[in-house]
């Protein structure tokens, strides 16, 4: 430990970083809640509730702005040492990823409003399974971030393959459904985008996981990259 | 002006910021090139060329990493004053937006490879018009960033409505095409996602424009927000 003033600066830096980590985790919890709410309104075909989910997304955007500013101000309290840069970069990137997750959840809610103008189609049920996996990934990666648990982060990344596989099979199911009954094409097209949104939430959880790994270990997580573009392949 | 050492720090900060701005603009130019190349491979049905576009995306990702690190190191040269925080935040956000634009361009290229397994469908031609507008927006917003031209940035944001309208009409055309000839459903589904990718490029150009405005004026650009989720509405 160093002299008193330096020590004081170090302490307030750590406290402030911890506070911001808490804010980021709360942002993430709101995003997970939003995804669950979006799937509920899909089931209930409740356009009013969908509007509330869409409106709630602003709260996440506002938090992301606050976190970004707070995190950057933090950097000025320190010399630019390797670990501090990693903390700051990770916080910024994770907050941005959560903001995107919130956008995807809001987009799912928004498309339910269009679906409600048409008769229900059966493959819509498949979205809940996708959403449950994606939510689980986001919850776990938030915990990995809060506890700086790189192994948990790696485990989250590995689950993304499962989500991709399920997404591919839902994609095919939707195409088949459209071919068998062209009257469902419009609804199924929206469901394709909703499924894709949820698959992208998994990509962002993976991206957060990679940031947690980098934060803890100071090097990139090796092995399979996140399958950001996989949905381009699954077509029959 | 202050004493010599301070002056020296200030100068190197400005020079470094200018260098990083140049890097970010170069990233953006690569992203625009990538989008054009993706549309060319769509026309030519050339899967080899598509693979090259996909591989090139790594160059943008590497640049984005470098820029993020460089920009954050910069902050340590200064006290955290308002304008500096704006510079740093804008650079980080703009680099991230360009990285996403590159991803979307690569995704368009990737989906052409699936399209090449099926007979061509006519509405594919509509993608070039969308891509031309999106590329023009990205080019102009890069210039707005380089020249700190807030009015040009605002003009870019206004063009996003035109892109959204065209996207909506291509979306409807594709759905109609699918309904009339269910054998095209798989190809058209990929074209829906490709059109959406290009529409999202316009959203990111708009996002960059808003960052340029904020950078110059220190306050948010008022009026219509970017229509990130509009694609949920256009279904018939």
Image: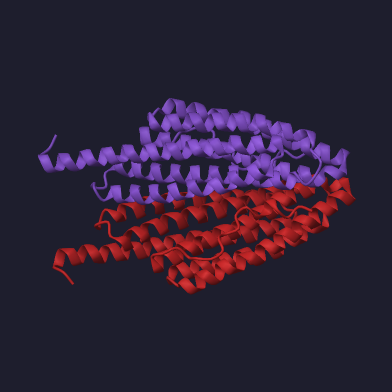
Chain colours: A purple, B red
Q: Quadrant of residue A91?
A: top left
The image shows residue B161 at horizontal and vertical percentages of 64, 65
* Residue A215 appearing in the image: yes
State the quadrant of the N terminus of chain A: top left
**Closer to the camera, B225 or B48?**
B225
**Closer to the camera, A183 or B120?**
A183
Residue extending furthest toward the right? B180
Is A59 rendered above or below residue B38?
above
| Left or right of A38, for residue A59 | left
Count up the numbered dots: 0
* Residue B49 appearing in the image: no
**Closer to the camera, A103 or B87?**
A103
Is B151 rendered above or below residue B77?
below
State the quadrant of the C terminus of chain A: top right
Residue at figure coordinates x 42%, y 51% from the top left: A65
Q: Quadrant of residue A202?
A: top right
The image shows residue B47 at horizontal and vertical percentages of 71, 49
Residue extending furthest toward the left? A3
Residue at figure coordinates x 45%, y 67% from the top left: B213
The image shows residue A178 at horizontal and vertical percentages of 83, 41
The image shows residue B49 at horizontal and vertical percentages of 67, 53
Residue extending furthest toward the front? A48
Is A177 rendered above or below residue B175?
above
Residue at figure coordinates x 40%, y 68% from the top left: B216
Residue at figure coordinates x 56%, y 46% from the top left: A103
């Amino acid at each position: 430990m160093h002299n008193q003033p330096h020590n004081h600066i170090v302490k307030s830096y750590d406290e402030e970083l911890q506070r911001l980590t808490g804010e980021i985790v709360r942002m993430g919890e709101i995003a997970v809640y939003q995804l669950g709410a979006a799937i509920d309104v899909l089931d209930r075909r409740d356009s009013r509730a969908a509007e509330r989910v869409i409106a709630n997304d602003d709260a996440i955007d506002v938090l992301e702005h606050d976190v970004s500013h707070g995190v950057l101000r933090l950097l000025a309290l320190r010399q630019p040492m390797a670990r501090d840069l990693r903390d700051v970069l990770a916080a910024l990137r994770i907050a941005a990823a959560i903001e995107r997750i919130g956008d995807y959840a809001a987009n799912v809610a928004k498309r339910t409003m269009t679906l409600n103008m048409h008769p229900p189609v059966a493959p819509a049920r498949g979205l809940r399974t996708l959403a449950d996996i994606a939510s689980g990934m986001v919850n776990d990666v938030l915990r990995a971030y809060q506890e700086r648990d790189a192994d948990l982060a790696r485990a989250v990344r590995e689950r993304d393959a499962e989500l991709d596989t399920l997404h591919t099979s839902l994609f095919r199911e939707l195409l088949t459904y459209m071919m068998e009954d062209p009257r469902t094409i419009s609804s199924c097209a929206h469901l394709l985008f909703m499924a894709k949104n949820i698959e992208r939430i998994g990509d962002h959880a993976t991206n957060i996981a990679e940031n947690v790994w980098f934060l803890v270990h100071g090097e990139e997580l090796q092995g399979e990259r996140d399958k950001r573009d996989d949905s381009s392949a699954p077509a029959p």
